[in-house]
Image (spheres, coloured by chain):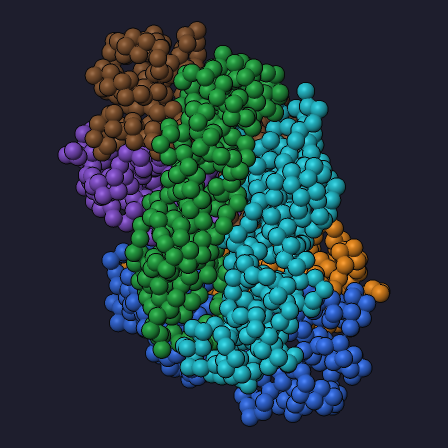
Chain colours: A green, B cyan, C brown, D purple, E orange, F blue
Amino acid sequence: MLYSRQLDELLFNALEEDIGHGDITTQATVAAERWAQGKFIAKAAGVVCGLLLVQRVFALLDPQIQFSSHVKEGEKISKGMVLAEISGPAGSILTGERVALNFLQHLSGIATQTRAAVEQVEGTKTKIVDTRKTTPGLRLVEKYAVRVGGAMNHRYNLADGVLIKDNHIVAAGGISQAISRVRSQVPHIMKIEIEVENLLQLSEALQAGAEVILLDNMSAEEMTKAVQMVDGRVLTEASGNMGEKDLREIAGTGVDFISIGALTHTVKALDISLRFVNEA
Amino acid sequence: MLYSRQLDELLFNALEEDIGHGDITTQATVAAERWAQGKFIAKAAGVVCGLLLVQRVFALLDPQIQFSSHVKEGEKISKGMVLAEISGPAGSILTGERVALNFLQHLSGIATQTRAAVEQVEGTKTKIVDTRKTTPGLRLVEKYAVRVGGAMNHRYNLADGVLIKDNHIVAAGGISQAISRVRSQVPHIMKIEIEVENLLQLSEALQAGAEVILLDNMSAEEMTKAVQMVDGRVLTEASGNMGEKDLREIAGTGVDFISIGALTHTVKALDISLRFVNEA
Amino acid sequence: MLYSRQLDELLFNALEEDIGHGDITTQATVAAERWAQGKFIAKAAGVVCGLLLVQRVFALLDPQIQFSSHVKEGEKISKGMVLAEISGPAGSILTGERVALNFLQHLSGIATQTRAAVEQVEGTKTKIVDTRKTTPGLRLVEKYAVRVGGAMNHRYNLADGVLIKDNHIVAAGGISQAISRVRSQVPHIMKIEIEVENLLQLSEALQAGAEVILLDNMSAEEMTKAVQMVDGRVLTEASGNMGEKDLREIAGTGVDFISIGALTHTVKALDISLRFVNEA
Amino acid sequence: MLYSRQLDELLFNALEEDIGHGDITTQATVAAERWAQGKFIAKAAGVVCGLLLVQRVFALLDPQIQFSSHVKEGEKISKGMVLAEISGPAGSILTGERVALNFLQHLSGIATQTRAAVEQVEGTKTKIVDTRKTTPGLRLVEKYAVRVGGAMNHRYNLADGVLIKDNHIVAAGGISQAISRVRSQVPHIMKIEIEVENLLQLSEALQAGAEVILLDNMSAEEMTKAVQMVDGRVLTEASGNMGEKDLREIAGTGVDFISIGALTHTVKALDISLRFVNEA
Amino acid sequence: MLYSRQLDELLFNALEEDIGHGDITTQATVAAERWAQGKFIAKAAGVVCGLLLVQRVFALLDPQIQFSSHVKEGEKISKGMVLAEISGPAGSILTGERVALNFLQHLSGIATQTRAAVEQVEGTKTKIVDTRKTTPGLRLVEKYAVRVGGAMNHRYNLADGVLIKDNHIVAAGGISQAISRVRSQVPHIMKIEIEVENLLQLSEALQAGAEVILLDNMSAEEMTKAVQMVDGRVLTEASGNMGEKDLREIAGTGVDFISIGALTHTVKALDISLRFVNEA
Amino acid sequence: MLYSRQLDELLFNALEEDIGHGDITTQATVAAERWAQGKFIAKAAGVVCGLLLVQRVFALLDPQIQFSSHVKEGEKISKGMVLAEISGPAGSILTGERVALNFLQHLSGIATQTRAAVEQVEGTKTKIVDTRKTTPGLRLVEKYAVRVGGAMNHRYNLADGVLIKDNHIVAAGGISQAISRVRSQVPHIMKIEIEVENLLQLSEALQAGAEVILLDNMSAEEMTKAVQMVDGRVLTEASGNMGEKDLREIAGTGVDFISIGALTHTVKALDISLRFVNEA
């Protein structure tokens, strides 16, 4: 992730949300010239993600703050590990602490559960992908956390990928009409993905020139048949509450991708804290 | 929650994030004059929150959309229940669906787990409150969901409440110095809350004029002693991974408040879907 | 183009740019209650585009203004034709006139020259597409004008499509490395397009799994060979100063697409004026 | 043009428009530590304008990029000339290339055709000025390009200059009423310009105290008479499709200014490219 | 003042500044369905200005609010007068009250003291004008209040008017150089104003073609001589702490304009209150 | 006041308001390489406030400008004192001068009159506080000026403090209902302030658990009785046109706080100028 104004806007807004017109407790108690040192410490095992954001949050808040990571984005961490160190004006560090941790814990939570899903299908050809079920406002960084966790991204939004769902099909008057309309209006560099619920629809979709097939809420058995019918001509993607399924079993059907909304819609924050050191 | 420009900005940004320069699939397949009807259906039991946002999301996207709720914010819902109905241009509904559901599921998730916590302490005098461990950018609506869930809000941000933590105490040179500095600089309408880790600190804090005491990471036994020492003179608040504690036991110590970060930092989306009806 | 906040921002900014803190001439000379009627008249033949924006510009400026189009977006118009009528407060119409015309003339200019290009290849299977050589800030509406003119859009920006150019190939260490890296990192719903300059590169690209081939600055003869080598397995796109080429000859090579930067980077405004009527 | 936040906003928005949530091709193929060098090369003769913007675009995108111009804004350039050199992270340069060139080619196109107009009237007292027929959103930089091209700016927008047109006259009840109303309401540091279509109106305008006369769509002959009638008492400006007229002939009428909308509304991009060097 | 997005931004920002994330007192005490009526009452005599803003503030906050003025902008009001009535949801009115009054009292304060200045010079040909000494962020509305008070505006900002001061003269190398440089670079529709401190400078300025002369900090006697020297050829403006001078005496010197910074930099809020009626 | 994006936005907006698309006089007369030095000089005695903003204004405008203060925020200054020195590009200093002075004079005006109020009650236990009667858009810096002047801030806005007024009481159905509703909905770290107009209401408020009492428009005599009735159990605040009262007499009643709207709503700019030195 390059330096990006979009990211800075996100971090600035988070800082303003939490600081408002000023951190009145810190302003009243901490002298401007007081310096502090602290360590970010994992209080649970997982996969770390977001240290780049933490660094930038503090840089935006106070350029005098020094920050250095001991681990890389995506590294597995264990309880008690020191993830990074920080030093600088004590007041600024205290003021930015909560925002920094809120990002770090949330994104590490996503990376951690993404990694778990990826590991379940390890050794198969199936890849894990995310969805658009992200937290409003955080898509940029949540999709980053998914990649850091080892999975791939699906489309970013409604503008950069085609996914024809049942209602689009109904509105267009059938599968082949929907596909042909899309083909004539959408940039030629985009593949056409279509959602099917059974083998009949699948057969129609293949005939109409679909390039990616989303197998929606099928049993493992039905998916296996679908994959056989497709026979490698186009890509297949398993979908539908995959967060609660046995991913290894799904991968066994031979699908190319499994998309999991829960990677981003149901996140357990990874417990990480900032501990101040030698500061008396 | 009155009509608010802050809320509108949040919703508009979420729409732009998800729609980008346009919903290319819908534009290609759904005729502008096509109308549709749909129902928001609970696929799991819980406490609903966010229907007001769903309504506003669609109103911002397309004023022709009609939306009517069947339940009230904060109502308990069961699996299969119809929460709301929507009708209007099919294209607009399809385009706004994901953003609307992302808000609804997330906020209902918060309201649901907040209600569970509130019910655990029912019948005691203890109240559940939230923290600043919210998702960056969503504090306005997450704190709303906490209220809808039946708990109370703690301070909104660093500007509208005082909480003196250990590092502030160290920086100020002691508990009484910290409190006196704050008292002389902070508006007189704010109570001074201070974090203490043991009874000795508590005793100092009381003497120095603290008005709310945060009992940090104490055992239930220690908390009981603390509450006895306070003897109703000031308010007490239990804190420290309360999301994993037996809240009824904590309430039994007699504390006035229990603050729980997990209400907002670890959220399981409540499963709700939009089903289109009779639309052929 | 649905109602869109992005569009409104564009129009509002254009209004602010032109109006500043107020239209001092109009404020001094035109009474608030004075009403006026006017007609938008073509002063040259072409393809009209932007009436939707004109309508919205005036709606944003003054909701009392009535606007009705006599022609549809994309319609061919001849010199002297009345394109639309407007009525409302004279002051508001005068104040918004220039911004409205600036959009209308520019977008109609694009639609007009796009239509000319499309007509050149009519009857062939080749399609005209645009590029990212758009006027900064106007991509949303310029790509709309291209569609209105009858051509298709290429990718919208660097995020929603892959195009591997020579420098990417050099950096990645070769064509097959570049394609394989992209394949493993980019969403599976995107086709991989690669730029080739000769048949050798084309052959490598095909072998490496490219899905769209951009034939850069080739002669018609060389393109014909390239198309034959591709033999319908992937899509082909001719590129390189196509604005100055004989498009019919290029189409004769059998390429699927011709991308033309000049559609948007070198635009002759279509002359359209607003004439006030019976207003004394 | 001083450092300006308005300019930065323009450039940032152009970058966001073109980069979206990230340059996926470059991110996948170009290693972060890879360095590159490139040259901006003129592929056609003209007047260069916009190198300052190019430099700023890259500085905003990546402060590690070095940029040095070989020519000055407004200099005449010939085909094949190296205009500037750039070096820095290869990925950042590739990501910013299109936006930089889009500005550079557009503004150089304006400067080139402005210079041509200025040269046509060289040796006369007549000066070329621009109009408000600029591309929406780009007025700041297009008016800059006009100055770089050697012409002068007319008013920036409706707030910083008076121009009474026929509809204002009708609304005010006549030329003298319009002028007297404006005089009593508009800051005393502004001259009052009025549009006249014939010598009768001119006579009235002079009597009423007009300070600048816009001669609208007059023949050269009529303009000559108008200039004689004015006799140096106020300024005169020729207007009306001047982009298609013989400017030398118009200047021969003795008018002080010729305003040309086509300087900014009909722009041919000047062909300039970025060529990477020695990069293997 | 037409409907304007700039004005709306100003009012929205003022509302956000005062309301933050919500009016907690009102939300807790006033039921959503409770209706209220109120009257805006003058508690001191003066000139009213800002009722249009008050109306818009409440419209932006809650479209259900009804507002009707009993007086016009610029009308003289006496103590006890009812200026306007309001009715609507009690909560919304209470929430918006302070912002509405802050604007109304401030702008009425400006209009009141502007009117007093205007009345001092009544009967003379001298006009009162404002300066750029406005409150940061409020120039749009403060200059409006000056007009409502009966005076005229000077230039709006540094971009829409020329005023050559001593430092510009020094930098340019003298009065005639400064004027000639400005003349060759600044739009021909702007008059050139220059500041002079004595008759010698005045003489130079007249010779160099200045069109407006600012007489800076001169005694009444010296001004009289200056006006005689100018002899109606150009405009004259008296300046320099005019807020503390006898304006009638200054007008007696025959200057065309007196510019007074204190009209906007030293404002006494006009006391106006909102009284609720019959609301039990 | 830490570095703050909110402050920067305020300053940037003020600069844009005053500079528009450029300072045309300075651009025409002052060469880019010309350097200048200047001194900020007090032309009246008072308390200085805003030098930090002046420094930041110039830093945002041109990083080459050097600025050094000779006095500290809040220091008493006398007529003729040099407050700060500035050096850098002459053009940039001239362009930023007015905005810098507008802030400095306004905030110093507030600090000066605040200090005067504070000195009136010196030696008593009573403290001066401000109100929400601030200039729209400037609350952040005006409340800062109040602190610099030596007084304390009351609540920042409607979200960070409770103040129950008569209309809230009526709407809630009485004093005790209002207080109990607020207590159950508002964060426990906030004190509940209520406005009372007589001793009967005071008695009710005390019984209902009010924590701060605002004594509205009472005579000194009545206030004295009120303070006696309160007897130190809760805080008391005198309010109601306090800007026109004898503050020492009010303090004599024993109230804890006096809130004065006039500190910020009726401000006399402190006269400070920028004088250029040795610049020829």
Horizontally, is E75 left or right of C140 in the view?
A: right
The x and y percentages for residue F120 are 57, 89
Instruction: State the residue in front, C158 or A130.
Output: A130
Quarter location, residue A236: top left
Q: Is residue E224 visible?
A: no
Looking at the image, which residue is at 70% across and 62% down?
Answer: B122
- D31 relative position to E227: left or right: left
In the orientation shown, which residue stands out farthest toward the left?
D278
Give the image quarter of residue E148.
bottom right
Q: Is residue B42 left or right of residue C258?
A: right
Taking D276 as reference, is E242 above or below it?
below
> Of A265 and F71, which appears nearest the observer?
A265
Q: Residue at x 70, y 89 (%)?
A: F231
Q: Position of residue C225 (x, y in %)?
A: 26, 9
Q: How far from the left and from the top, in percent, is residue C32?
A: 67, 45
Residue A271 visible (yes or no): yes
Quadrant including the C terminus of chain D: top left
Residue at left offset 78%, top offset 73%:
F175
- Figure check: E204 above or below D64: below
Instruction: Give residue C122's position: percent from left, percent from top.
Output: 43, 9
Q: Check the image and report above or below for C21 versus B274.
A: below
Quick check: E268 above or below F203? above
User: Which residue occupies the foreground of this view, A89 or C186?
Assistant: C186
**x 67%, y 44%: residue:** B45
